[in-house]
Amino acid sequence: MKGGEHRPVGLREEENQRLAIGVSGDFPYLHFRSSDHKPRMDLVLDEQGKPGLLMYDDIAVRVALGILTAVRLKVEQNQLVAGIE
């Protein structure tokens, strides 16, 4: 490629997304990734509309804030998995 040209990136591929905004079931979320494609922050709402904020380092979730009593949160392979209990 010539200097200054950029190859198009497929944004449907999760590893190319730096910011993902969406809905899983009835629950909205925001997912932020760093330039190394690792998750760094997730903002989720539970079924009562209460927010949860999770912040990651290179290893695991290091900060979890919010009212998460009705939401089951766990990390599998450094990915957030949320489900209603």
Image: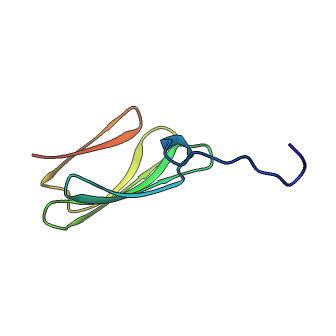
Look at the picture and state if 9 lies above or below 53.
above
Residue visible at 76% across and 50% down in the picture: 6
Q: Position of residue 11 (x, y in %)?
A: 54, 49
- Residue drawn at (35%, 58%) of the image: 22
Q: Residue furthest bottom?
A: 49
Instruction: Tell which of 64 and 74 is nearer to you.
Output: 74
Relative to 43, is 40 on the left or the right?
A: right
Q: Position of residue 36 (x, y in %)?
A: 61, 43
Residue for point 14% across, 55% down? 69
Residue 12, horizontal then vertical, whole percent = 49, 45
In this view, 39 is above or below 69: above
Q: Would residue 52 be found to the left or right of residue 32 on screen? A: left
Decide which of 36, 14 is in the foreground and name it: 14
Is residue 63 in sight in this rendering?
Answer: yes
Among the 4 quarters of the image, the one containing residue 28: bottom left
Residue closest to the far top: 77
Relative placement, left or right, of 3 versus 20 is right
| Whether residue 57 can be seen here | no
Q: Position of residue 18 (x, y in %)?
A: 54, 53
